[in-house]
Every structure is written in C-alpha cells, then in structure tokens.
C-alpha cells in the first residue's frame, strides 16, 4: 500500500492557493501573482503562424502564436515581458495579448510576440512563452507612429527586467 499524508491548504499572500485565485490573477494580467501560486511562470506553447506583418513595417516584427491548447486561459489583454524559447534557444520578448485596437479589425484576441535581438524565419516552428510581468494594458493609439513610440518604451521596460 501507499501511505497518504494529509496536509493543510497551501497559502500565498495570506490566502489559500486555489485554481479560482490563479485564474482570477491571470485574467487580471497579474502573471507574477499567478506564478507565485503555481510555483512557476505561466506558459503558453504553440506554433508560429503568418500574420499581417504590420509589426515588421514598424521595426517590431512579431511571432504570431497559434496555441496547441486553444482553450487554455490567456492572461488579460496587455503587453507582457516574456521569456521566449524557440530553435533550442532562449530570448527576451514582449508579448501583446488582445485585439490589437490600433491595427486590428475585429475582436479576435491574438498572441503576438516581438523577440528581442532576433531576426530569423520561424514560421511553422514551436514557440514557448513564459510570462514574467505585465508592462501595460492594451490600448488604441491615434497613429502607427504613436504606437511605434510606445513599443520603443515597452522594449526599454522589458530590457530592465532581471533574471535573464
């Protein structure tokens, strides 16, 4: 036989850890809080698919992710600092989750990641994202120039991150 040891609830931040608390934190974009409860960074995994290439025209090419688990909970809409794993290597990245209100045409949520210091064709390859922290909420900009300026700020913010 097996011996079963019963333990009390695990607490994080003064409250018991539960799947509801983890889902609530993720939906609010609180990926650091979710990671503390999970014991690891929240991850998404998928294949890189072709997009509209609008990011490339602004100097911020993105890898558009088609999830292997399409029903997996996405963190709340916004821009995140992420670890990116592809082609057996690891990079820093900034990931946008949302409807792309400045350039999008509809309400379909996407997962797009700009990989820092990376310029390779990875269409059709695996990509793994580990969420580090939220940089900002997604918002609509008045022009592509204004969006590009914000992306530059986002990149600087991602570069401040530690642990890479």
Image (cartoon, rainbow, N blue to C red):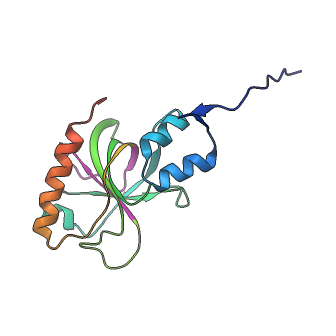
The answer to whether 84 appears left or right of 120 in the picture is: right
Image quarter of the N terminus: top right
Please state if 152 lies on the left or on the right of 63 as rendered.
left
**Where residue 155 appears, x then y in whole percent?**
19, 47
Query: Whole-percent x and y of residue 4?
Result: 82, 24
- Is the residue 147 above or below the residue 143 in the image? above
Residue extending farthest to the bottom is 105
The residue at 21%/44% (across/down) is 157
Q: Can see residue 30?
A: yes
Residue 149 location, quadrant: bottom left
Image coords of residue 29 (percent x, y): 42, 52
Could you say which is closer to the camera, residue 16 or residue 114?
16
Q: Is residue 114 magenta?
A: yes
Of all residues, the one furthest to the front in this rendering is: 14
Magenta residues (range): 110-130
Task: Please state, as top left, top right, bottom left or bottom right, where the C terminus lies in the image.
Answer: top left
Inspect this view and state whether residue 86 appears.
no
Which residue: 14% across, 61% down? 148
- Kindly identify the residue that appears in the image at 39 percent across and 45 percent down: 129
Residue 107, above or below 71: below
Q: How many marks?
A: 0
Most foreground residue, 28 or 3: 28
**Residue 113 lies within the magenta run:** yes
Q: Residue 13, percent across and down?
A: 53, 35
């Amino acid at each position: 036989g097996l011996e079963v040891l019963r333990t009390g609830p695990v607490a994080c931040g003064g409250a018991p850890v539960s799947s509801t608390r983890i889902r609530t934190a993720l939906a609010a974009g609180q990926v650091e809080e979710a990671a503390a409860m999970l014991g690891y960074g929240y991850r998404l995994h998928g294949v890189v698919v072709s997009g509209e290439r609008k990011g490339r025209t602004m100097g911020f090419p993105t890898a558009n992710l088609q999830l292997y688990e399409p029903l997996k909970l996405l963190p709340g809409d916004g821009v995140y600092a992420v670890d990116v794993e592809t082609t057996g290597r690891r990079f820093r990245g900034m990931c946008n989750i949302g409807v792309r209100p400045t350039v999008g045409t509809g309400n379909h949520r996407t997962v797009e990641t700009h990989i820092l210091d990376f310029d390779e064709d990875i269409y059709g390859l695996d990509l793994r994202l580990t969420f580090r922290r939220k940089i900002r909420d997604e918002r609509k900009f008045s022009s592509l120039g204004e969006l590009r300026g914000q992306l530059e700020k986002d990149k600087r913010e991602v570069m401040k991150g530690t642990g890479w």
